[in-house]
Image (cartoon, grey):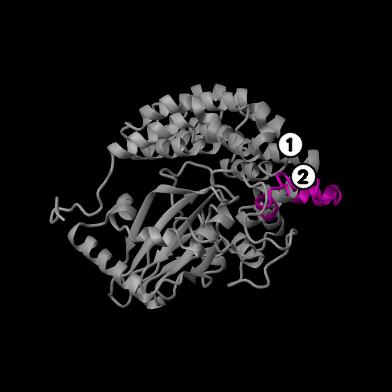
Amino acid sequence: MSRPTPVLLTDEQMRTFITEGFLILQTDFPESFHLALTDQLNHVYEHEGNPGNNLLPRIRELQKVFDHPVVTGALTSVLGPNYMLHAHRHGHYNASPVAGGWHKDSYWGYKRMRNHHPWWAMIMYFPQDTPVELGPTGIMPGTQNYESRTFETNNPEGEAVASGKAGTFALIHYDIWHRSTPNLLGRHRYMLKFEFMRTAAPQAPSWNCRETEWKRPASFSTPIVEHEAMWKETWNWLSGRLGSLAGAFASGGAEAFHATVAKLEDPYEPNALDAVYELAGRGPEGVEALMRGLLHDHVKVSRTAAYGLAVAGAEAVAPLERALGSERDETVVHAAYALGELRHLSAQAVPSLIKLLDHPSAPVRQTVAETLGMIGTPADHVASALTRCLQDEDAQVRFIAGLALCRVGSAGEAAVPQLAKALDDDNRYVRAHAAEALHYIGTDSAKDVLIRFLLNSRWCPTTTPQSTFYP
């Protein structure tokens, strides 16, 4: 049976997602659906505890949520039609009268460079009526691109909350700052968190796009720091326009240029980000300034410069490839990250990246594995290198390789025998990502391995200590 047609986001909703980093949306399930769902959650949590990554198979009715056209439409709009439901998922239970701490979720480790482009997103689903007093998730609008928490002093009252009737959900940029808010009512409050990944770079808008050019949202939910160049570049990227900032800014004279370069070291992160996006549009002189930033003594400046280089277009590829030879691991990570974001424009750097798979630093090898999957060409070299990564001693290199092969698709056929071995890995995410890679490779041999694995590992959602065999 086919799914209902997804309800795609509008231009205005996409503008809001790009600027604020989240949307609060609503499904239309009947009240009886959510009453039954919360009854089952109450039973499972009381008698079995949190099912963790088995949340979806343990509570089978949840699949209807992720087949709902508003949910599939929101995810398709932001992540493209072939998005992946990640193996990690969690049912958050909040009974605390004290707010949780502000945080960004990790990628199973915090050393990974975070993406300004929405390669990842999360759905936070509320199966019960969730007024503000019941402790919904709090979100700080516009903070998805910040490493620091400058918002706590600059806009401490700007928090948005995912409050609403049963069936409300927050679609959030994976990297946005968020927290749990106080549950003042003392009643059960569940939030069901699922993660999703884009498996293909955008080639055209995947939302209900009526206006091709960027313009600001009609309004913001709360005052936020404005980043016009960053927002426009993200809109263009989601529309399939890679490197759209290249040459976008006319020279404002030497004095203005040097003032922009100086902002690379501004301790106020939003100012530094504005500077790198402007420099990305200044052609060769901008790329040269960003490369000096990449090699800066302070790692924070280097990382920020990498975001500019990641959107600077083909002009940045050759100097970034040279930076892969840096003696500082962080510089290598930042350069490899930027090359990955430049995708096929960086194909010439693939041999240099492959050499780094012998690097002693696990974060370097992790970044290179992801970068190779994002560049994707020449496909045979990339698939061979990622097959090698599946055998790395570091678990994160191995499971990133599985995710990267999801982006390679059928060109990853040569990796199938090693993916079959990865299905027996000690790490749960290596196993899960290997299964996903086999799915996205999609050849007959990949499907045979995947089906055999799924049959052998079939999990029965109704088998519990109280019901072992019957009915």
- Please rate how many residues cluster around mark 2, counting C-alpha atoms within 10 Å: few if below 14, some from 14 to 19, many from 20: many
Q: In this image, 309 relative to 98: left or right?
A: right
Foreground residue, 65 or 135? 65
Q: Which mark is residue 246?
A: 2
Instruction: Give the image location of residue 449, x and y in percent.
Output: 38, 31
Q: Secondary structure at mark 2?
A: loop
Q: Secondary structure at mark 1?
A: helix
Is residue 136 rendered magenta in the image?
A: no
Foreground residue, 266 or 428? 428
Distance CA(mark 1)–CA(mark 2): 8 Å
Query: Would residue 335 be visible to someone looking at this image?
Result: no
In the depicted structure, whether residue 331 falls above or below residue 210: above
Q: In this image, 390 relative to 96: left or right?
A: right
Instruction: Give the image location of residue 278, x and y in percent.
Output: 74, 50
Q: Which mark is residue 438?
A: none
The residue positioned 73% from the left and 60% from the top of the image is: 214
Q: In this image, 426 relative to 239: left or right?
A: left
Is residue 251 rendered magenta in the image?
A: yes
Identify which amino acid the numbered label 2 is placed on.
Ala
Instruction: Give the image location of residue 298, x and y in percent.
Output: 59, 41
- Please rate how many residues cluster around mark 1, counting C-alpha atoms within 10 Å: few if below 14, some from 14 to 19, many from 20: some
Q: Magenta part of the protein: which range?
A: 234-261
Residue furthest to the front in view is: 1
Instruction: Give the image location of residue 357, x and y in percent.
Output: 51, 24
Q: Are marks 1 and 2 in contact (CB under 8 Å)?
A: yes
Residue under pointer 1:
314
In the depicted structure, whether residue 186 falls above or below residue 51: below
